[in-house]
Image (tube, helix red, strand yellow):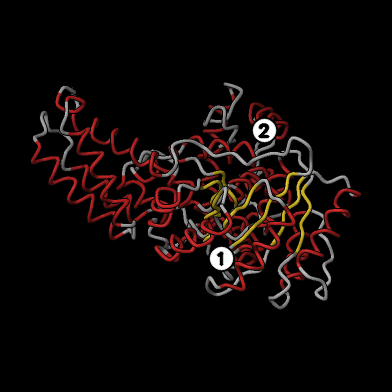
Amino acid sequence: MFNNLADKLDSVFKKLKGRGRLTAEDIDATLREVRLALLEADVNFKVVKDFLARIRERAVGDEVSGSLTPAQQVIKIVHGELAGILGGSRAELAKADVPPTRILMVGLQGSGKTTTCAKLALHLKEQGLRPYLIPADLSRPAAVDQLVSVAGKVGVPVFPSDISLTPVEVYRQAAVAAGRAGCDTLIVDTAGRLHVDDDLMAEALALSGAVHPHETLLVADSMTGQDAVQVAESFHSKLKLTGIILTKLDGDARGGAALSMRHITGVPIKFAGIGEGMGGLEAFYPDRIASRILGMGDVMTLIDKAEKAFDEKEAAKLVKKTRKGDFDLADFRDQLKKVKEMGSMQEILSMLPLPGKMKNAMPAEMDDRELVKVTAIIDSMTPRERQQPKIINGSRRKRISAGSGTTVTDVNRLLKQFDQAKKMMKRFGKGGRGPMGGMKMPF
C-alpha cells in the first residue's frame, strides 16, 4: 500500500534531517520534490496544489523556524495535512435508530462490488450484527450466483433473487424475508457497468428511492487512479454518496485515488479492501494511512489484526505451555498460520516503524512462500518429532525433506529458527504476555 510514494517521500525528507535550520529556499526545494512524487502517484493536480500551499504556509512560519528539530516539524506538518486530505478522522457507518440499517452498494463492473458486499457482511457479523445480503444486480450473468456463493463463505443469509423480477421488487421481497429472519442490516448489491451511463444511474436511482438507504457506499477500484475519482464524482452527483470503499489497495496502486477522492468529492473513505480473502476489509483511518505513507508504520492497525487473529484463551494456554517448556513444533506451525491470517508478511512489515533499508531487506527473508514451506516441513514430521525435535537426526531430516518437497538445508534452517523462537518465547513467557505486549502475539 503506497509503497512507491512512501519510498519517494522518505528519500525527500532524508535530505532535511540533520539540518539545524531550514530556509524558505530549502522548503521550496523539498516541496517541489514532494509535488513530483504526488503527481507520479496519480494524485489529482488540484489536490496537490492545495496540499502544498497549506504545507508551505505553515512550514515557512514560526511553526518550523522556532523548532529545535525543523525537519521533524516539517514531517509532522505533512503528516497532519495528509491525514486531513484523507478525511481527518475515522468515518463510522451510520446505524438506524430502528432496525434494519439499509446499505446500498454501488459501483462499476469489475470494481469488486459483489465480493465487497460479502466482506462488509462479515465485518458487521463480527461486530455482533445480523446482516442480510440482497442480490439486486440482475443485469450481469451469474451475479446472483456469485453473491450466493460468497455469502456462503462468510455464513451470512442471502435472498434467492428471481431474475424475472425488477431490482425494486427483489428488494421489497427481500426486506420482508430479512425481517422474518431477524436480521438488522440489509446490504443491497446493485448492478454495475463498464462505464457510467444513463441506464445505470436510472436503475440505481429507482432502487435508492425504494430502499431509502442510511448508507450509499461506492465501491471503487483504487488501481484505476484518476478514473476512480471521476466515477465517484458521477455517482455522488446523482446518488449523494455517504461513503467510499476502496478495493485492491494492497495491489500496485500508486495511491492517487485514495489521496484525491476525499478532497475532490467530500465523501469519506470508510473501508479499504486488502487481499483476496473474505476477511480482507479494513476500517479506513486517515491518520494511520498518513503514517504508513510517511514510513512511520501503523502499529494500531497491526494490534487490531493481531487481536482478531489470536484468541485470548488460546494465547493464555500457549503462555502456560511456554513457561513449562512444552512449546513444540505443532504450536510453532499453528502460530505461523495465525500470522498468515493477519495478512502478507510485506503488509505486516509495512505497519512496523522500521527504517526503509530494513523494510526492503526483510521481505526476501520473510517471503509468504516460506510460511507454506515451513508448514509442509512440520506436517511431514511424526507427532513425536514435533514434540521432541531433538530426536530429528540426519536420516529423519532426509525423510522429512523428501516428504515435504524441500531440502535438508530447509529442514535444518527451520529447526534452528524454532530453537531461537522457543528461547524467545520462554523469555517473554515469564512476563505473562507475548513479546508484542498487548497484541497477544505468541512470538
Q: Which residue is drawn at 65% across and 40% down?
A: 94
Q: Which mark is residue 315?
A: 2
Q: Residue furthest right?
A: 180
Dot placed on the residue nearer the N-terminal end, 2 or 1: 1
Residue 23, horizontal then vertical, whole percent: 8, 35
Q: What element carries label 1?
A: loop
Q: Indicate the amino acid at tag 2.
A: Ala
Q: Which residue is drawn at 52% across and 30% down?
A: 435
Query: Alpha carbon of mark 2 to alpha carbon of mark 1: how far?
Result: 38 Å
- Pointer 1: what residue? 111
Residue 86, horizontal then vertical, whole percent: 42, 44
Q: In this view, does 142 lie to the left or right of 47?
A: right
In-front residue for pair 393/437: 437
Q: In this view, does 339 lie above or below 138?
A: above
Q: Is residue 179 above or below residue 373?
A: above
Q: Which mark is residue 352?
A: none
Q: In this view, does 427 lie to the left or right of 175?
A: left
Q: Is residue 166 above or below residue 32?
A: below
Q: Residue at x 24, y 31 (%)?
A: 72
In-front residue for pair 309/434: 309
Q: What element carries label 2?
A: helix
Residue 75 sits in which quadrant? Answer: top left
Residue 179 appears anywhere in the view:
yes
